[in-house]
Amino acid sequence: MKKLIMPKARLERRRGISLLPNLLTTCGLYAGFYSIISSVNGNFFHAAVAIVISGVFDGLDGRIARITRTTSLFGIEYDSLSDLVAFGVAPAVLVYLWALQPFGRLGWVIGFLFLACGALRLARFNANVSDQDPKYFQGLSIPAGAGMIAATVFLFDYLNLEGSIKQWAVLITVIILSFLMVSNLKYISLKGELVKKKPFNSLVVTILMLAMISVQPQVTLYVIGLVYIISGPVLTVLLPKPLPDEDEAELETPAVKL
């Protein structure tokens, strides 16, 4: 008897999906939605905390999928949609209701700018993921941009900054973050760095950072985020530029007449 050969797409559907990684992604999506609800209700500190929690789940789902070897196209697409809500829509709503609303139309346009640049960053990453160096990101990642907005909320709440100073500082910060996400600057990718072997000094530095976060979490988180954002332009300047391919070099070499 001949075996029934089923199409590959149908086999994928019958195999189902991996529960644990996608459940973690759902938790991150839930935290992002909770952040939006908190912003609407005026609980901006809780909204920022929810974005940070969503970032924790975003870091866990991919690692769990790779460790358990359950990565799938469904999981990748679901993770991107979750990221757009948790790190695009949620921080855009947060900054508008928290600081940009007094600017009127300009305020919600700047909030949309962050959302649009975050969506473009996700689309570019998904389209070019096979061509990118796994050690570096092209442009600031959208979770890092959202995390910086959350850290700004923590810092301003700690310093009790209000009025025009807060509004203009947040406006400028959101514009800078938006363009950094769609830039070609290189940022160190932190994916998988925690499970790789590192020098002993790395553990000491990590312990010191945790101690500083415990003492002054609002200030320390903002400083860490600011250092990471500044590292992009610095790293782009210091890294050697890739040499052109041989075929491109031949095309660029002018022909010599004999």
Image (cartoon, rainbow, N blue to C red):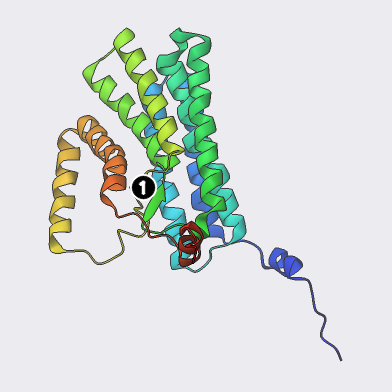
* Position of residue 192 in the picture relative to residue 11 (left or right): left
Residue that mark 1 sits on? 186
Q: Residue furthest bottom?
A: 1
Q: Confirm whether residue 32 shows in the render.
A: no
Which quadrant: the N terminus?
Answer: bottom right
**Residue occupying image coordinates x 42% and y 28%:** 47
Q: Nearer the viewer, residue 77 or 235?
A: 235
Relative vertical location of residue 230 with respect to residue 76 in this rendering, above or below = above
Q: Residues within 10 Å of mark 1 (few under 14, many from 20)?
A: many
Q: The residue under label 1 is which amino acid type?
A: Lys
Answer with left or right where residue 108 lies relative to residue 228: right
Q: Nearer the viewer, residue 79 or 140?
A: 140
* Residue 73, horizontal then vertical, whole percent: 60, 59
- Considering every residue shown, the one lying at the far right of the view is 1
- Percent x, y of residue 4: 83, 81
Determine whether, in the image, residue 234 is placed left or right of residue 192.
left
Tag 1 secondary structure: strand
How far from the left and from the top, in percent, is residue 203? 17, 57
Q: Position of residue 82 (x, y in %)?
A: 54, 43
Residue at (46% x, 18% y) in the render: 96
Residue 88 visible? yes
